[in-house]
Image (tube, rainbow, N blue to C red):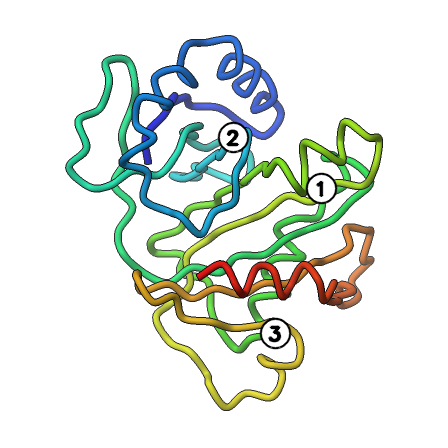
Amino acid sequence: MVGMYRETSFSKAGNVWQDFFQSDVIEKLNMLSDVKSCDDIDANDGIGLMYNFIDNQNFNIIIGDFVQTGTEIPEGLFAKHIPKGLTAQVQIEGNNIADILDSAYLLITEAVEKTGEEIDYENFYWCEVYTHERYSVPLNRGEKVIIDYIMPVKAKINKHSPSATACIAIKRAKAVNRFRSFCIIKSRNVEGKNPAIFYKRKNQAALLLQR
């Protein structure tokens, strides 16, 4: 992962994103377009990788993109190696970004548990992807938005779990060792209840056909 690095918190992360868009980081990242490594991530306006959580508020963040190992990094950018492994990819829909962020962690952990998988807290990171199609375009139209999330899960797949195939589509990517789970979750105040998990079948099919 290569990009702009900051130590921040959830209350100040918005300022970090403002710094990113006002800087020359995007121009430098465009120089690396030929060595970007995750072709299963849709076109986007920004990827934020959060890690090294000191507590439930403070963390380190890199806003940038994933590139191939061994890439020569432009001056002024920070690089962090992300080890090969399995990830869960979840989409959360809400009326606005605040609605999504308020409940994202609870909804994602619920979604991962539905597959019988387990989040890898030993190698934990939290990745937000703001895609053109699901975030930026609907935001400009005043419509509901979707944020894509990526986080590591432990290397096991319960192929025979009925709940896994019923709730979230599971696929092992061909090129990299990656567990991919896709669902769209409504962001809301769940008040201790299970979150509403549902499919938008057109979106599901498009995502599964990416690789």
Q: CA distance from mark 1 to mark 2?
A: 20 Å
Residue neighbourhood size for the residue with mark 3, other residues' Cα within 10 Å, grouped as few (<14), some (14–19), many (≥20): some
Residue neighbourhood size for the residue with mark 2, other residues' Cα within 10 Å, grouped as few (<14), some (14–19), many (≥20): some
Q: CA distance from mark 3 to mark 2?
A: 28 Å
Q: Nearer the viewer, mark 3 or mark 2?
A: 2
Q: Amino acid at mark 3?
A: Lys
| Horizontal side of residue 180 vs 13, given as left or right | left
| Residue 94 quadrant | top right
Q: Residue at x 38, y 39 (%)?
A: 52
Q: Residue at x 24, y 18 (%)?
A: 74
Image marks 3 and 2: residues in contact by CB distance under 8 Å: no
Q: Which residue is mark 3?
A: 114
x and y percent of residue 54 in the render?
Answer: 43, 37
| Secondary structure of the residue carrying numbered label 3 | helix
Q: Amino acid at mark 2?
A: Gly
| Secondary structure of the residue carrying numbered label 2 | strand
Task: Tally the marks.
Answer: 3
Q: Residue at x 42, y 66 (%)?
A: 179
| Horizontal side of residue 78 vs 147, given as left or right | left
Q: Nearer the viewer, mark 1 or mark 2?
A: 2
Which of disc 2 and disc 3 is earlier in sequence?
2
Which of disc 2 and disc 1 is earlier in sequence?
2
Q: Which residue is mark 2?
A: 46
Q: Which residue is mark 1?
A: 102
The foreground one among 188 and 9 is 188
Image marks 1 and 2: residues in contact by CB distance under 8 Å: no
Q: Residue at x 71, y 33 (%)?
A: 137
